[in-house]
Amino acid sequence: MIQGKKVRFRAIEEKDLEYMVEWINDPDISNLVVGWTFPISMAEQREWFIKSLNDQNNQRWIVETFDGQPIGLTGLWEIDFHNRHALTALKIGSKNIWGKGYGADAIMALMTYAFFQVGLNRLWGEILPFNEGSYRAYVVKCGWKVEGILRQHIFRNGKFYDLIRVAILKDEFCAHPQAINYIPQVEKNSISIKPEHISFDLSSLQESLRK
Ligand SMILES: CC(C)(COP(=O)(O)OP(=O)(O)OC[C@H]1O[C@@H](n2cnc3c(N)ncnc32)[C@H](O)[C@@H]1OP(=O)(O)O)[C@@H](O)C(=O)NCCC(=O)NCCS
């Protein structure tokens, strides 16, 4: 279980497919996400789910509250285990709770998991220029950096829009003032240990080996 301060992530189960379809088909949500699809049926969603089960490089999780209420979807896509980077995205499907900090908590939890459990060094994402909520959650609140603009990369509602490429490095996450509340205790300890604090008594080790 991957856990933040307000939300946790778990694997997708078949019971989740119904509201995942609702979120995909909701124009208030689909207008804000980068990927575009025709309206999705339950049958298509089930087929996608079966195919996704063996896909190691694209991992998606349900975001839920601590009382088990599913509120959204996140994940790591295009995981590159050699260069240690991945694409990520987040959808809070429950529109009534936008702007209450669930998104930023999910992003902080995702970064903690990606950097400290999966072993990645860089996460990247894409934001539509009119998606203020996403820009505020990733860039303003969670410390992501704008790396570039893909000009007229997206066709939406009869018009071309630029696409904003954003990313964060593990070191930048660790420097975020809130990161200390997310990074695992064992990692915090290793960060605070300086070489001059390590005293190694070779003679007592040799003594214990002789016994
Ligand atoms: C983007 C998203 C994940 C953010 O989740 P959230 O729970 O609203 O995130 P937070 O509350 O932590 O932070 C969002 C910030 O943006 C603001 N915000 C949220 N929705 C907004 C909107 N539609 N317009 C303007 N500002 C918005 C919030 O007030 C908050 O700002 P503040 O805390 O600095 O005042 C969520 O709005 C969402 O799922 N949107 C639809 C799908 C989407 O856009 N996904 C991202 C694609 S890259």
Image (spheres, rainbow, N blue to C red):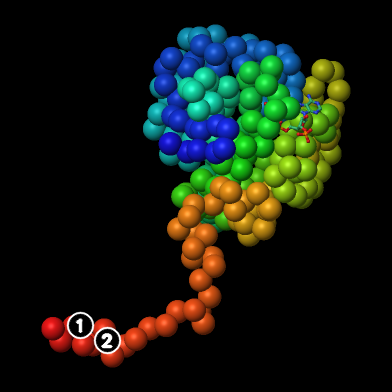
Left or right of 194 on screen, residue 100: right
Residue 90 place in picture, x, y as percent: 63, 32
* Residue 58 visible: no
Left or right of 4 on screen, residue 134: right
Q: Residue furthest left?
A: 211
Element under disc 2: helix
Q: Nearer the viewer, residue 136 or 204?
A: 204
* Residue 56 visible: yes
Residue 59 place in picture, x, y as percent: 49, 35
Q: Nearer the viewer, residue 74 or 189?
A: 189
Left or right of 166 on screen, residue 17: left
To which residue does mark 1 refer?
208
* Disc 1 + disc 2, Cβ < 8 Å: yes
To which residue does mark 2 refer?
204
Image quadrant containing the C terminus: bottom left
Question: Which picture quadrant has residue 206?
Answer: bottom left
Q: Relative to 39, is 75 above or below?
A: below
Element under disc 1: helix
Q: Relative to 82, is 99 above or below?
A: above
Q: Is mark 2 within 8 Å of ligand 1?
A: no
Q: Nearer the viewer, residue 39 or 209?
A: 209
Q: Relative to 201, is 11 above or below?
A: above
Q: Amino acid at mark 1?
A: Ser
Cα distance, mark 1 to mark 2?
6 Å
Q: Is mark 1 within 8 Å of ligand 1?
A: no
